[in-house]
Image (spheres, helix red, strand yellow):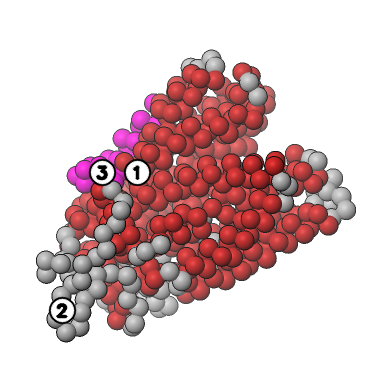
């Protein structure tokens, strides 16, 4: 079981034990991208200088060439799938209800399938699972397109059953590139503890913590970019060409970019979990032997702590879904409902920039404190959603509100990595991503009902409640990390 201490407070022994696991995998022939050492002299070859500024220049050196753009665009099909299905099925059936059900089937499939794919990746390795998922997902999306156009009528749930099943399978098999990338970053930054630097020593815990903060802040920004770019790309292609084109493009990107991501050398840093844990070994510090009862108690405690960031992502998704629906109702009062996407993108823009800034936050500002402070700001700023009486004032509010959103997401993913049991990192990362999907569906439904019956103000209350829930869970996470067994 991994130590549940925050990265900012991890000692060298805890991180070294993680490095030992990665080192064991490399001893079997898997050696990720890292500093090249000449066998004869033992001199470390200088790493290629990156063109990226500041701390972000370290990322290509850690993961290897091509990883950043590949990881960014390989996750784009996931961002296109739900909105693309909604657009396609609505256009074919001429029914918003059937289109919404098909999009919901995709969301449910993604929420159910993502942790399964993560668990399989933990056991069998990322490369194999991603390659299989890429093929299955491409076939599922092609089947969705075929069923949507070949079904004679889609006027009822029974008639649309084939579309709903295909949508569920497409969502369940969608490769989880974002969570898998985060797992690789955590393995790569841990690995560097045991690798020599150009000066002959090894990188410190603080330096690796800075690298991980930088990588996860980049990942948060990449998620924000793709989940703004994906729906926008669907809208442009569907309106200018045909409603089938966004899903066809998503399938093409999946079958080409995901396999490239799967076989990228960075995947060698992640060692599959052993099938059977060795009993009677020392704890995470290697200082004491444990009994089966103690191990069982620690495992239960560990998964209970994991549930906190997963539930937090459900609240985060609820915030997103409720805000989207509330903005649709709000914009319809002052302009047209179609500009709700533009308003929502404003919040995504400031959130993405703020997520990047986390790389430069001081390390003494621990993860628990970051979560609580950012969630408190998010809760207070969400109250401003009730103030504007026009489109431009709402733009200002959303621009400010997005500032704490990105850091909260980055921090929750970071804590998820800290509390993940050994060998179950992909399971936890995909569960966090599934929490966002499930929460978005929940927030959209609840806020939609309130917006229709009581107006956008009532729908915005759901967003405020979700932000307050994130604050409460941040406090719980801080207490849980301090009271670990």
Give the residue displayed 75% in from the left and 39% down from the top: 96
- Classify residue 470 by image quadrant: top left
Q: Position of residue 176 (x, y in %)?
A: 51, 59
Residue ID for mark 1: 356
Per the picture, the main secondary structure of the magenta-coloured stretch is helix
Dot 2 or dot 3: first in sequence order is: 2
Asked whether, in this view, residue 463 is left or right of residue 36, the answer is right
Q: Is residue 181 left or right of residue 103?
A: left
Q: Is residue 252 above or below residue 53?
A: below
Q: Badges 2 and 3: C-beta atoms under 8 Å apart?
A: no
Give the SS element for disc 3.
helix
Q: Is residue 226 visible?
A: yes
Q: State the residue at coordinates (81%, 45%).
A: 93
Give the CA distance from mark 2 to mark 1.
36 Å
Residue wearing tag 2: 42
The magenta segment is 358-380
| Residue 30 shown left or right of residue 74 in the figure | left
Mark 2 neighbour class, 10 Å CA radius: few under 14, some 14 to 19, many 20 or more = few
């Amino acid at each position: 079981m991994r130590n549940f201490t925050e990265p900012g407070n991890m000692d060298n022994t805890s991180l070294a034990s993680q490095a030992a696991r990665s080192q064991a995998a490399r001893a079997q022939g898997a050696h990720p991208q890292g500093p090249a050492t000449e066998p004869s002299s033992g001199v470390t070859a200088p790493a290629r200088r990156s063109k990226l500024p500041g701390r972000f220049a370290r990322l290509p050196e850690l993961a290897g060439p091509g990883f950043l753009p590949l990881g960014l665009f390989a996750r784009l099909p996931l961002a296109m799938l739900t909105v693309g299905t909604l657009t396609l099925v609505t256009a074919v059936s001429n029914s918003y209800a059937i289109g919404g059900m098909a999009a919901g089937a995709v969301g449910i499939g993604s929420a159910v399938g993502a942790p399964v794919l993560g668990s399989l990746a933990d056991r069998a390795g990322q490369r194999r699972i991603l390659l299989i998922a890429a093929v299955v997902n491409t076939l599922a999306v092609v089947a969705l397109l075929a069923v949507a156009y070949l079904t004679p009528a889609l006027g009822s749930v029974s008639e649309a059953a084939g579309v709903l099943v295909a949508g569920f399978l497409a969502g369940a098999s969608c490769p989880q590139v974002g969570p898998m990338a985060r797992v690789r970053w955590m393995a790569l930054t841990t690995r560097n503890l045991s690798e020599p630097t150009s000066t002959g020593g090894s990188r410190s815990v603080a330096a690796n913590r800075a690298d991980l903060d930088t990588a996860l802040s980049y990942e948060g920004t990449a998620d924000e970019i793709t989940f703004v770019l994906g729906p926008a790309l669907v809208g442009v292609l569907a309106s200018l060409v045909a409603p089938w084109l966004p899903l066809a493009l998503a399938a093409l990107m999946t079958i080409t970019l995901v396999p490239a991501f799967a076989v990228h050398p960075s995947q060698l840093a992640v060692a599959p979990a052993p099938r059977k844990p060795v009993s009677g070994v020392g704890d995470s510090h290697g200082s004491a032997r444990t009994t089966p009862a103690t191990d069982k108690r620690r495992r239960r405690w560990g998964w209970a702590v994991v549930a906190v960031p997963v539930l937090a992502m459900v609240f985060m998704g609820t915030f997103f879904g409720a805000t989207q629906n509330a903005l649709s109702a709000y914009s319809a009062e002052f302009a047209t409902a179609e500009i709700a996407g533009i308003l929502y993108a404003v919040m995504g823009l400031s959130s993405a920039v703020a997520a990047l800034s986390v790389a430069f936050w001081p390390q003494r500002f621990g993860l628990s404190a970051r979560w609580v402070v950012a969630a408190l700001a998010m809760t207070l700023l969400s109250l401003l959603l009730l103030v504007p009486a026009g489109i431009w004032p709402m733009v200002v509010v959303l621009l400010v509100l997005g500032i704490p959103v990105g850091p909260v997401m980055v921090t929750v993913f970071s804590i998820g990595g800290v509390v993940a049991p050994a060998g179950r990192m992909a399971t936890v990362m995909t569960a966090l991503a599934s929490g966002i999907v499930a929460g978005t569906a929940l927030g959209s439904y609840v806020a939609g009902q309130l917006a229709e019956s009581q107006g956008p103000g009532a729908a915005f209350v759901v967003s405020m409640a979700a932000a307050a829930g994130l604050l409460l869970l941040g406090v719980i996470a801080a207490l849980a990390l301090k009271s670990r067994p």
